Every structure is written in C-alpha cells, then in structure tokens.
Amino acid sequence: MKRTLLILTITCFTFSVNAQDEAAQKNWMEYATPGSMQKMIAMSDGQWATDMTFWMAPGAPPSKGSGSCTNKMILGGRFQETKHTSSFAGQPFEGIGTMGYDNLKKVFQSSWVDNMSTGIMYMEGKWDDATRSVVFTGKCTNPASGKEMNVREVYKIIDDNTHLMEMYQMENGTEYKSMEMKMTRK
C-alpha cells in the first residue's frame, strides 16, 4: 500500500510539474514573440531627416538644429534601434535609442544615450489610439543641478512619413517643453 501511494504521489507531482512547465513555456513564448506592437514600431524603420527646436529653460528663446536618424529593427524584430546625428551648440551630436514593447507589462519602453552625457535615460509609456501617440515618462539626471528630474516624451505618428517628438522636463516644480523634433522620412 505504501509503495502504491508513493508511486501515485510521484506521478501526480510529475504531472503537476509538467503542466507548470508547459504553461511557463507558453508564457515565455508569448513574452518573447514579436507581435502587432513590434510590427507597428517597425513601420518607422528607415532614414529620417530631423528638424529640432530646443529651449534651455522656461521662457528661453528657442534654438534650432537639423540632422538625421536611422531606425532599424534588431534582435529578430523585438526592438528598434535609432541612431541620431546632428550638431548642437556648434558641437557634433550623436545619440542612440532603443524602443520596444513589453508583451507582458503591456507598455512601450525606451532607452537613450548620447555623447553629451554619461547617463542612460529610461522611460515607459502607453499607446493612445485617439492621438496616435505614445506618452513616455521617466527620469534622468539634470547636469545643471546634479539631481534626478522627471521627464515626459510624447511621440506622435502624424502619418507614415511624418513623426513628431516633444520632450518635457521639470524645472523648479514646473514642467516645460525643452525640445521638439519633427522627423520626415527621406
């Protein structure tokens, strides 16, 4: 009797582990498989001309610039890498961003690094069908104060060949627009 009970217990445990393994594998595959959101991101692959406007402080006069960026899906269509080049304040500017959609968390994620800082900016956001945009929020270091500050980015798809990115940051508790970049497909 004890041997039969032991075999039955081991068999039930094995079935339970196998069912958990199958569920875990299914969840992992759904998490790892590019879907409709990654396909939407991929629609902006290609070469883009950029026209930028910067505001260094609330109420400051704007400065203008232009450049280009290249967007390319990487890692089997899971993420999009963007490489920007331009000049800022007479200096060459390079930046690299990565954008993806987390299938599990149901959010867009974005990282940014450039040659004018040593920090990584990370943001998350959700798609808004009504405005055809993703509103990202996150934090980065303010080099002037040395403190962390809240940032917000609105990335809007105007049409297949025109996108608009607006960046906002906090200054003394007040949010202001610090950058606007219009991207036009080449």
Image: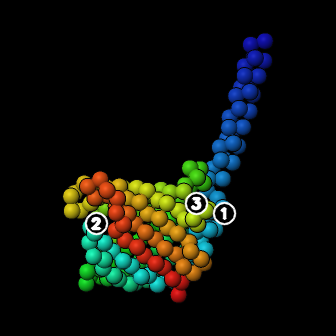
Which one is in front, 5 or 95? 95
Q: State the image coordinates of residue 134 (x, y, percent, origin top left).
A: 53, 62
Q: Which mark is residue 94?
A: none
First reached walking from the N terminus: tag 1 or tag 2: 1
Q: State the image coordinates of residue 50 (x, y, percent, origin top left).
A: 44, 81
The furthest residue to the left: 145
Mark 2 residue crowding within 10 angstroms, few (<14) / some (14–19) / many (20+): some
Residue denoted by label 1:
36
Whether residue 167 is visible to the viewer of this picture, yes or no, is: yes
State which quadrant residue 129 falls in: bottom right
Which one is in front, 173 or 41? 173
Which one is in front, 147 or 19? 147
Q: State the image coordinates of residue 169 (x, y, percent, origin top left).
A: 34, 61
Whether residue 75 is visible to the viewer of this picture, yes or no, is: no
Residue denoted by label 2:
58
State which quadrant residue 1 falls in: top right
Residue type at mark 2? Pro
Residue in the image at 26% along x and 55% along y: 172
How far apart marks 1 and 2 lie (CA) works out to 39 Å
Residue in the image at 59% along x and 77% along y: 159
Residue in the image at 46% along x and 84% along y: 49
The furthest residue to the bottom: 186
Q: Nearer the viewer, mark 3 or mark 2?
A: 2
SS for tag 2? Answer: loop
First reached walking from the N terminus: tag 3 or tag 2: 2
Residue type at mark 3? Asp
Mark 3 residue crowding within 10 angstroms, few (<14) / some (14–19) / many (20+): few
Residue denoted by label 3:
128
From the viewer's perspective, tell me whether residue 9 is left or right of residue 82.
right
Check the image and report above or below for 172 versus 91. Answer: above
Mark 1 residue crowding within 10 angstroms, few (<14) / some (14–19) / many (20+): few
Check the image and report above or below for 35 versus 105. Answer: below
